[in-house]
Image: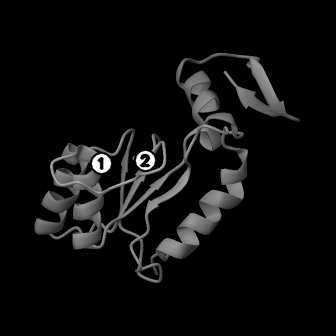
Amino acid sequence: MALAIADLISKLEAWADPAWQESWDNCGWQVQPGILNQPAQVLVCLTPTLAVMAEALKLREQGTGVNLILAHHPLIFSPLKAVIQGDPVGDMVQQAIAHGIGIYTAHTNFDQVQDGTADLLAQVLHLQHSEPVVPTQPGLGYG
């Protein structure tokens, strides 16, 4: 049985707590789809762009029911004052809502968590004895 969206996000947040994000960051739900009990069909990306949304919709047409975009970088960094057609962020929000696709981000909370961005890069580069350049809490940090 597939993991529901709500359960997937709960597991992700238990590992990379959004409370660990930097003060300027915006981790967590960018667009919450209102379908949290449905099985998660996830498209993973670095930055949620209109090209990523187009890929999600293309996958849907091909029978893969994408209902969640899990991104590293936030779609919305500062308070969104208006959803404007023709603006990339506005268009992403409109399309996500229209198609029932959630957008969730794990940015600076994922950068510093154990086995997060820095640890994965260290593994790919076969680095040994890596430790955080900027410690943020015991055993965790950036770099």
- What color scheme is it? one colour
* Residue type, mark 1 in image: Val
Quadrant containing the C terminus in the rendered view: top right
**x, y percent for residue 94:** 24, 63
**x, y percent for residue 91:** 22, 54
122 on left or right of 34: right
139 over 53 or under it: above or below? above
**x, y percent for residue 51:** 19, 44
Q: For numbered disc 2, what is the local secondary structure?
A: loop
Residue of label 2: 76
114 over 7 or under it: above or below? above
Query: Where is residue 114, by image quadrant?
Result: top right
Query: Where is residue 96, by image quadrant?
Result: bottom left
Q: How many marks?
A: 2
90 over 62 or under it: above or below? above
State the mark number for residue 89. 1
**In the depicted view, which residue is nearer to us: 121 or 78?**
78
